[in-house]
Structures are given as C-alpha cells and as structure tokens.
Image: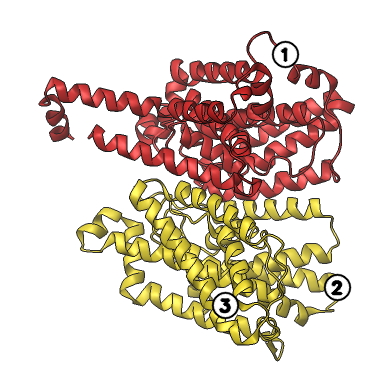
Chain colours: A red, B yellow
Amino acid sequence: MTAASLDTTAKTSAERGALARARLLRGLLPALSLALVLLAIAWLNPRAISYFGFSLMLNLAIPIALATIAQMFVIAGNELDLSIGTFVGFVGCVTATWLKDAPLVGVVILLGSIGVYALLGALIHLRNLPSIVVTLGMSFVWQGLAILVLPKPGGKAPDWLLAFMAFKPPFVPFPIIAALLIGLIVHFGLMRTSYGVILRGSGGNPAALGRAGWSLLKTKIVLFALAGLFGVLSGMALIGITTSADANIGNGYTLLAIAGVILGGGEFVGGRVSPIGAVIGALTLALAASPLLTFMHIPPDWQVAANGAILIIVLAARVLISRRER
Amino acid sequence: MAVLKPLLAKPWIWSFLGALLVWLATIVFTGGYGAGGMVTAALSLAVFTVIVGVGQMFVITLGPGNVDLSLPANIGLASAVAMKVMDGNDSMIAVGLLAALATGVAIGAANYLLIWALRIPPIIATLSASFIIQSIDISYGRGLQIKPPPGFADFANWQVLGIPVLAILTVLFTIGAAIALQRMIYGRSVLAIGQNIRAAWLAGVNVGRIRFLTYTLSGALGGIDGALLAGYFRGANVDIGNEYLLASIAVVVIGGTSVAGGKANVPGVWGAALFLVLLLTMLNTFGVSAGVRLLLTGLIIVGVITAAGGQKALR
C-alpha cells in the first residue's frame, strides 16, 4: 500500500493529468452510454426526439428507475436482492386492489411490506445469511402473496395515482423530470449526508465501521428498509402507468435493476454505488430495450439480448478506461 | 447413539431428514396411499435439479460472488438444440446429446471468457450472457414443436423396479463428482481457490484454468440437463429451465455447501433436491392453491436457511 502511494506521488504532472482524465471518463461513462443510445435513436428516427416521443419511449422508465434505486441500496451494503421484481409485482397487485378499494388497509399492507424488508435486513445480518438465498426464497413469498391478492390479471389503479402518473408538465416530459428528481434526492441523501456516508461505509469496510462504534445491524436494516420503500414506489408507479395489475408484472425487474446499478457505475462490493448513475443506467436500459430496437427493425425476440449486449459493451469500455487509470 | 453421533455431525444429513419428514407428513395425510409412487416420482424429478445443482455447487465453491445465473437460459437453449438435432429420430439420439453438451460447453466457456476478459463479477457476466442466450433461444426455438425420439423419451422415463434408471445413473455421476471434489487435483484446487484464491495461486494452482474448467463444467451439465428435461417432458420449450435458477442455488445451500466458498458437499445436493421436490408434492397433495404453494415454498426455504445459519466469514 505504501509502495503504491509513493508510486503515485512520484508520477509526473502529465501522468496525473491523464489519470484524472481517465477517472473523469469513467465517471461519465453512464451518461455517455445514454447519450450514445439517444444519438442512435435520433439518427434512426428524428421524430422520436420530441416531447411526445420521450413521454412515450420513457413511459416505463420511472418504475424501472425506482426499482434500480431499491436494488442500489441493497448492493451498497454488499448484498443482492433477487426478490425486488416479484416484490414490485406484489406491490402492484396491492395497489390495484386494496389501495383503491380500502386505502387505509392498502397503506398498512404496503408499510408492513417495508417492515418485512427491514426485518430481512436484520435477519441477514444477525444470522449471517447469504442474501442471495434469502431473497431468492422471498421472491417466492412475494409471488405467492401477489397471486393470493390478485389471482387473475385485473384490478384498477386508484384515480389519484392515475392522475399523478399522467401529469404533463410544460416543455419537459414527466418521466425525465421524475428521473432527475429521484436521482437528485437519493444522491443528496446517500452521497451528501453524514449518515449516507455511514451507509456506504457499511459496504466499504464493515469491520472498521463496527469498531468505530456504528451499529452494522442498524445500517443493514436501514438499507433494506430503503430498498423496500423504493420497491413500493416502483410498484405504485408501474400500476399508475399500466392502470391494472398482474401477479407477474414485475418479474423482469429483478435482473433489470441489477443491470441498471452496474451500468450506472455501481460495484457489487465495497459500497461503491452512484444514485444518479443508477437512474441513468435504468433510462439507458429502458430506451435501448425497446424503442431503439423498434427503430432498427430488430424483432422483439432480441430485446433481452440488447440488454445483455449493452451491459457487456459498457463493462468492456470500463475495463479499457480502468487499464489507462493504472 | 455412538453410531448416530458422527452421522448427525454431517452437514448433509439434515436435508435428508427434511426430505424424510416431508414424505412422512404426506403419506400420513394420504393414509399410506401412494407412498412408493411418490418416491419414484420424486427421484425422477430430483435428478434434473441434482445435475445442475452439482454444476452450481462447483461454481459456488470457487468463492464469494461466483454463481452461474445463466443455467436457466442454458437449459432452455440446449433443450431446443437437442430436440432439433434429434428431430424425432432414434438414430440421432447420441448426436443430439452431444449437440446439447456442446451448446452447454460453449455457454460455459463464453461465461468465463466474459469474466476473464472484462474482469467483471461472475454474477453480472453470467447475467448478461443469460440475456443473450435467452434471446437466441426465443429466436431459434420459435414454434419448435418437435417431439423427442421415442427411444429417448422412453429412456428418460425408464424405470426398473420403481427406480428411475436416470436416477441410478445420476447417483453414479454424483459419486464421481464427490470423488473428483475430494480426491482429485481438480476438486482440491476448486476448494483451495474458494478458501483463499491468493494462497491457492501462490501454492501453484493454475487459478485461471480451474475457474475456466468449473464454469465450462457447469455449462456442460446445464446442456445435458436441458436435453434430458426435453426427453422427460416430451418436448423443448423456452421456459423449461426457469425454475432451475432458484432450485440449483437452493439445493447447494440447503445441502450444506458454504456460500462463502471453499466448502462443498455432494450428498447434500441429493438430500436438498429430494426435499424440494417432496415439499412440492406435499403441498400439491394437501390441495393448496398456487399462491399458498409459492408462499409456503418461499417461507420454508428462508426458514431452512435461517435454521442452518450462515458460517462466519473466514476473513
């Protein structure tokens, strides 16, 4: 470690400049990939770059961005949530049934489900369980509950939620404003507040944090509760757009959310995450998955592959940049 | 008691006890009816979980973060490839199996190529690969309604004295896997890498080659599993492997293999697979709805893993 730092100080200013450029490039990578996808869309279909075009293309971006943020909180604590997709589906089913017919019961159920998430965090910490397996098991629980709440596709979103999601602000489409707001709020909370630093620290070096007197149990509970909260928001936003629910509606979100976090510059270990990056990653996936392919006349069969290919390309670019960093 | 004590200390014994308990609960409910048939059915279904479970076990044993998420997509594509190559023709069975195996090997090798070339966590590498494989499968297997050759379907469903032949072959395979794990250089290397990758490297283990072999093995087993599943269920389909993502990871963990790596357990995979299959049979016998069945399956998995507890991390 000492040798490495000596090495850094010994570097010439030119080398340091190159290093700073590489770091900047790495930080900008999520934004660059989004810009690239946007450019491709603009080139293929200029008419899509309009108020109406964006409202349409980014239709589902809000719930994806929220689910990605939920996953990001879990990843910040060095865990992984494989149940967020079915959780979003469960929330969707509750939103389309209880929240409309008996709002009070609906709110209690949703708050309770956030509580379950917090409990899972506690359980994983106290028993030192692998989060992959626990959340994989929970994905069955949420799916089962979703089917019990809504055995057949249907239900209806509450009117206030429909009105909210159909909001049409002047000049800038709602999904873009919402994505900006989500990114900025979470960025402020996680990156700029002192407890946010502690939360990320619990992923970066849990042992050191524990010795400094912070409760690792509490950080894990908070991270999982935040994941639950954003999962609930994601499910509600989704139903606000689709108007009715289906028990399987969120299943694809688990993997999309992980991909979004990684695309946005997050890493699996070390508490290194980026809320704004995660939102950008989610937008990139949302745009690349269907509008771009439609404009390129690629059959929908290859939509999933596009997500995989984008992940691989961005990660390959990251490796190239990191190589220069050293 | 003296005989029982060392037996109880084995981590895999609990999964077998769980399976036994679930089986007893079911036959008490049915009043003893169908007890034997249930074991036969459980054995034939558990086989498919065991095959991919063993592959997943080797991968997970490589250490934290190592997991093969591409197995479901792999199984789906291999099942389609096998059915297309066999084309309902008995003489093409061996060729079809080889084709499925080759598909799996290629997928496993591609997984490791991504991990090695992009230096990304295996989870995200196998995840991106599975996105692409899934699309290939959807596009390749569209409208595919080829039945397996009668000889192959009969083989996959063949029973001798109520014991599925496939299960006997799989037992032999798992014995081989256990020997490879505990007594061969390859297996010892996998365990060493899982315990401390740097120490293993310093000790002269060819880390890259062993990891490559392990991901390829997992891919190959997924490919074979896809072909056998298509034979057993008499046809390939895109979703045929979906349930094996959870199942393959769950049987490894419930069976006593450490998620932190470096500690694997082959018999536990069998116990856990039987436990999961019998659990499903029990819930079906009790006549619960699909929702309750999913709910209980999830709760029991979480419960079992909580009771088993995680090991303290080595570092």
Q: Quadrant of residue A150?
A: top right
- Helix or strand or loop: what does disc 3 sit on? helix
Q: CA distance from mark 2 to mark 1?
A: 60 Å
The reply to whether residue B8 is visible in this rendering is: no
- Helix or strand or loop: what does disc 1 sit on? loop
Q: Residue furthest top?
A: A170
In the image: residue B46, left or right of residue A249: left
Which kind of residue does numbered mark 2 sit on?
Thr
Q: Earlier in the sequence, mark 3 or mark 2?
A: 2
* Label 3 sits on residue: B96
* Label 2 sits on residue: B30
Q: Chain of mark 2?
A: B
Q: Quadrant of the C terminus of chain A?
A: top left
**Above or below, comparing residue A277 to residue A317 in the picture:** above
**Above or below, comparing residue A162 to residue B269 in the picture:** above
* Label 1 sits on residue: A168
The reply to whether residue B123 is visible in this rendering is: yes
Q: Chain of mark 3?
A: B
Q: Quadrant of residue A317?
A: top left
Disc 3 to disc 1: CB gap under 8 Å = no
Checking the image for residue A64, the label placed there is none
Q: Chain of mark 1?
A: A
Q: Of A294 and A111, which appears nearest the observer?
A: A294
Front position among marks 2 and 1? 1
